[in-house]
Amino acid sequence: MYLDNIQNVQSSWVTQGLKVLQMGLRFGGNDVGSVMLEENVVRAAGTANCTTEEELRRIIRDAGFKPVQRDTLYTTMFLN
């Protein structure tokens, strides 16, 4: 499938875990969900994935990509 009208696809890790995050990046995702300070909805459903900013950076690098912090408008804030 080719989605030419969608600029950004987020690979989520909160519900599926970090390995699925890496797979999502390898299959075309170009955004990663952030570190959750407090996540109650997914936890109430029985899933308890958590990570740190440093671990997210490592996971992104291990998948072959360069982590970049962005704002809500997808403007690059700084390179990591």
Image (cartoon, rainbow, N blue to C red):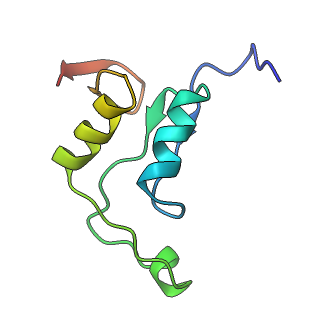
Residue 12 in picture, x, y percent from top left: 51, 49
User: How many tags in the picture?
Assistant: 0
Q: Nearer the viewer, residue 25 or 45?
A: 25
Residue 65 in picture, x, y percent from top left: 36, 22
Residue 79 in picture, x, y percent from top left: 19, 19
The answer to whether residue 46 is above or below residue 72 is below
Would residue 75 appear left or right of 30 to someone viewing this image? left
Question: Quadrant location of the N terminus?
Answer: top right
Residue 57 in picture, x, y percent from top left: 24, 37
**Residue at position x 50%, y 77% in the image:** 41
Q: Nearer the viewer, residue 38 or 58?
A: 58
Q: Nearer the viewer, residue 72 or 19?
A: 19
Extreme-right residue of the structure = 1
- Does residue 21 appear in the picture of this structure? yes
**Residue at position x 17%, y 25% in the image:** 80
**Residue at position x 46%, y 32% in the image:** 31
- Does residue 12 appear in the picture of this structure? no
**Residue at position x 50%, y 86% in the image:** 44
Q: Quadrant of residue 63?
A: top left
Would residue 13 appear left or right of 67 to someone viewing this image? right
Q: Quadrant of residue 66?
A: top left
Q: Nearer the viewer, residue 72 or 29?
A: 29
The answer to whether residue 55 is above or below residue 30 is below
Extreme-top residue of the structure = 4
Q: Quadrant of residue 45?
A: bottom right
